[in-house]
Amino acid sequence: MVEDIGAGGDLIITLYLIHFAFSLLAAELRNLKWSIVAITIQSLFLTSILATFANIAANPSLYWWSLTSLITKVIIIPLLLLLYIRQLPTAETRPWLGTAPSVAAMFILVVIFYSFLHTNVEFIAPTLQAAVEPARSNLALSLTICALGLWVLLLRKDAAKAVIGLVLLENGVHLSLVTLAPTLPETTIIGIITNVIITVWLLLYLAGRIFQTLGTTDTATLSELKH
Amino acid sequence: MSYSHCQRGKDMTSAIGIGILNLFIALGLSPLFEGVARKLRATVHSRIGPPVIQPYYDLLKLLGKEDIRSSSNYLAGLAPWACFAVVATATLFVPIGTGEAPFGAFGDAILFIYIIALAAVALIVTAAASENPFALIGASREMMMHLAVEPVLAIALITAAINARSFGMGDMVNWYHFHGPSLSMITATIFLFLALQAQVGKLPFDIPEAEQEVMGGVLIEQSGPQYALLMWSMMTKQIIFVSLFCQIFIPWPRTGNLAWDILIHLAKVLVVVLIIGLIDVVNPRLRIDQAIKYYLLLVFFSLGSIAFAVIGA
Amino acid sequence: MTTLWILLCSLGILALGAGIAAITYKQHKTCSWISFATVFASTTGIIYCAAQVFINGPIKTAQPLFSLPGIGASLMITVDALSALFLVITSVICFCSTLYSIHYMSYYKGESLLRYYPFLLLFALGMMGVVCVSDMLFFFVFWEFMTLTSYVLVIYERNEEINLRAGFLYFLLTHIGLLCMFVAAFLLYARVGSFSFKEMQNAMGMLLTQNTALLHLVLTLFFIGFATKAAALPFGAWLPEAHPVAPSSISAILSGVMIKMGVYGILRVFVWMLPSSHAWYIWGGVIAIFGIISMVIGSLAALTQDDNKKLIAFSSIGQIGYILLAVGMGMSFLRVAPPLAAVAFLAALYHLVNDAALKALWFLNAGSIIYRIGTRDLNRMGGLGTLMPITATTGLIACLSVAGIPPLSSFTSKWLIFQSSLIGGIDMPIYLVFGVAAFFMSVVTLAYALKYMNATFLGKSHGEINRSLITEVPISMKIPQIILAVICLGLGVLPIMVLKVLYPALNSLLPFGYLPRFTALFGSGLTGINLSFAGGISGMWNPLWLIIAAGFCFGLGYLVFRFSSAGGSRVRVAETWYGGRKHAAGEVRYTSLSFYVPFKQYFAFRVKGIDFEGLYPKTLHLPRMTIPQWLRAVLDIDHWLYYPFASGFVRLSQWFSRVHVGIPQVYILWIIIGVIAAIIVLFTLPAG
């Protein structure tokens, strides 16, 4: 198996890069619609990564994984997002950091994080197999995307953007599951994904209500609810 | 000397007999003595004055007059009757001529003092029940006079009691008769004599019935038979007090014969009534506070007679 | 044994009744009638037991009901003839008072019955308990019980501040007395280690021979305690303040029974417990002196009062003076002339019984007036005799009784007091002076009794009184007065019977053999007394013959009336005419303030800015309960401990709550930090 990585390995890496790029875009784009589009495409590439992994690791269940992730992450979640975005203003509420510094900071952090993870992967990897390529990069990347998602969640003031950050986070976790738990049965995945869908739905609903109540999606204003 | 029970039966009839005699003398003859006093007064005023039996005529006339009552309080009708009855009862407990009071086995000197107090109460209640403010003034003054004068009477009787070692009037009379004059008894006699004037309600101490000052005081609202009864009680009271004074404090002379004893007693009473009448004529009326001061001083000094009695003098 | 059982039931039913009354207090009628039924049952039981004691001798429990062997106290119920006498007095007067309260309490419209009936029944229980125990500790328990329940009853009308201050004065003085008694009891307890009366008697005997000064200290303390309760001046300054403010039915019990408990205590401790010695002589004199002070000051002060219940309260003090004088005389003469002492003691007990009945009657009478008129001021009454004839009659009987007019009750007891003090005083002249003073005060008593009578029932009505609205009081208020009036009359008309009942009571008090035979003292007549105690009869009194004589004389008076009506005299009621014209109601009145003014002026003076009227300070400054400023600050723990602590805590928690900023991202950050910290901790912990 390890030897077969070679050709598939390049594909994987390409897919990784594109996946990563679109993640960045999703995180950074101020226009919510385009951000959703970006994340849809990112999810699409996630599906393809999963399929490739299925091929490389000769794990048939991973095919099912990619199918389910296709249905949910590419179709259902973006639909939900688009549905709820309609009530909200198109532009995201201005975050604390401006575009340029935000991008720069994001870039730097991502790079540092990735390299750190890549070198110290033994720390996290459960099996010996996970400590070698392509699993190694997979792990590093997925955790980086998790971190990215968290970054968005924490540092973006917009409520809808926070949902997008959550989706990112979720994607990253999903990706890491490939290396961390390859023999996970299908139903578990379905369970996880259902969980995610419902969470996203609820959060979107809440964002809509926040907009109705407070007139803005700025989470900083949620402290008003304290009074 | 005291009653022993084997004599009970005989003494009962004699007690009742003498009691009726007492009532006759005190009730029946008191207007006569009053008439004599009025005649004396007229003489001093250089007048002829009314006949001696005039008080009888007055009482008879009043008995036939209309009885106008100022209040529908039942006490207003009851009190004059009670006053008369109480004074009449008091005569049964005073020796008049005899050595022992008719009902002396049933009550002693202390009882007598309280019966006299009850008579004063009846008079005061009569006055107060009449709703006339003058009558109430009179009632208040009557009580104060009583307050001031009764102690003198009491102290005199106590002196006699201490000497006789008994409160029974008969015992007192007998003791004094046999023992003869003593310092304590003589002082008691003097003080009691000074108190007599107020007890019989004559000037200068007739403050409760002051004719001019309080329009008759306690008697202002009384008329007809009630007025007659009250006047009669006052005349009887004069006889009772003078009798008491004469019998206990001047018990001589004393023969064994009942009729002679009574006559001698009445003669003594007449003399004392005349003296009282004389004082009454020549004196003006005192004010109530002057009278009280006079009598409270007298009470204080009369304690001396008790002191003499205690040391046996 | 059954008698004892009935006694315990009678006492127990009072407690039960108190409980029921406490539950049903909201329904006035139910509560009143249940309380009355309880008292009625209790009274019948008590009278039966007392009769048994008088006939058969003392009863006592074989086993203590309750005992504390560690401190030597045990609750044994012992009823001898003296206790039986007091039980009868208590139960009869409580009975009359409870019957009276049924309608009287409707005068106090705003007040709750919860503070009245339960406490009334417990008060009765306490008083009965005081005389039934033979153990000092339980005596104090019941004494305190009696004091506390009576305090609650005294301050029943709570909305006036003056009432609360008067109640506080009562509370304060009686507790000071109690404290003195406690100390005395402990001094005796220290000698014998037991609280029972018998042991205390032995302790006193021991002290007599070993340490006489300590004995006198003990006796002084006991005297202060009992004299405070008996309201002997100067200890009894609470009585003229507390009695007027209490409801009249309670004043009746307080004056009629409770202060007599002080006399009971004096009799128990000074005559029964104290061994025969010269101490009797000394203390007899002391008690008699305090008696005279109370008598003189109380009676003269009563003369100057314009508040009807205060007048009666001072009269209580005066009559207690008579009782204490007689007790003192009895004690002084007990070793030198026992017959004289016996007469004096019997006079004291007789006067006690008389005063209980007539004081209760008088207070209930005053209460009836207050019920109708609404004021206690004698200046604002008058002329009520025509509107309330039965109340006027009972009032007249009460007034004549207290003055000692024969044949009513007080005459016999006063007669005995005069006889013993004046004839007995030949050997001890001080008592002669006391006797003369007692006589003078008797006349003063008559004066203030007539003042009450004149100002209330006779004379002209006050202008404010609407005569058309005043009617007689309800029948349940008349019946107790009539019962007590009949008792007053009966006590006066049957002196030998009463003395025959009192004689065993005295016998139980004195050491054996001191008391002469009854017939030797009082003669063998059934209706009259032939008193002889100094060799030879010194006094005679037969009320029956007095009544016969008076009846005859009334008949004479009636004859006069018949004569006069035969002569044409008619009765006509006309309006009063004076001063030249008719006067409106209340226009010209001689008020009670004006009565006896020249006499009052002799006894009024001024010392250091306090006016004395009738030898008593006119305004007694009632103590106010005040706490010094610094103590109040220390006791205000809220201010220096709780509030600073609480506000600091609030500020701390507010500082903590700033964590909740309301922004979700911050919360997520906290969670992440927490997770990372947990992981670090987990990995750095040593394994295992």
Image (cartoon, coloured by chain):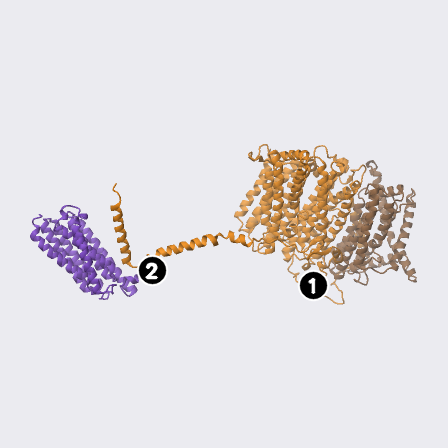
Chain colours: A purple, B brown, C orange
Q: Nearer the viewer, mark 2 or mark 1?
A: 2
x then y, percent, for residue C268:
66, 38
Tell me: A74 left or right of C579: left
Is C293 in front, or is C454?
A: C293
Indicate the chain on which mark 1 is placed.
Answer: C
Is C432 in front, or is A10?
A: A10
Is C35 in front, or is B183?
A: B183
Tell me if I can see residue C273 in this picture: yes
- Secondary structure of the residue carrying tag 1 is loop
Q: Which of the numbered marks, if any, corresponds to residue A18?
A: none
Tell me: A50 left or right of C271: left
- Secondary structure of the residue carrying tag 2 is helix
Tell me: C95 left or right of C679: right
Is the residue at mark 2 from the same chain as the one at mark 1?
no
Which quadrant does the N terminus of chain C fall into? top right
Are dots 2 and 1 in contact, CB under 8 Å? no
Which quadrant does the C terminus of chain C fall into? top left
Please rate how many residues cluster around mark 1, counting C-alpha atoms within 10 Å: few if below 14, some from 14 to 19, many from 20: some
x then y, percent, for residue B78:
75, 54
Name the image quarter holding residue B4: top right
Please rate how many residues cluster around mark 2, counting C-alpha atoms within 10 Å: few if below 14, some from 14 to 19, many from 20: few
Residue, disc 1: C586
x then y, percent, for residue C352:
69, 44
> Please, is residue A153 above or below residue C480 in the view?
below
Indicate the chain on which mark 2 is placed.
Answer: A
**Mark 2 and mark 1: Cα distance apart in space:** 77 Å
x then y, percent, for residue B161:
82, 43
Three-letter amino acid code of the residue under disc 1 = Gly
Three-letter amino acid code of the residue under disc 2 = Lys
Residue, disc 2: A226
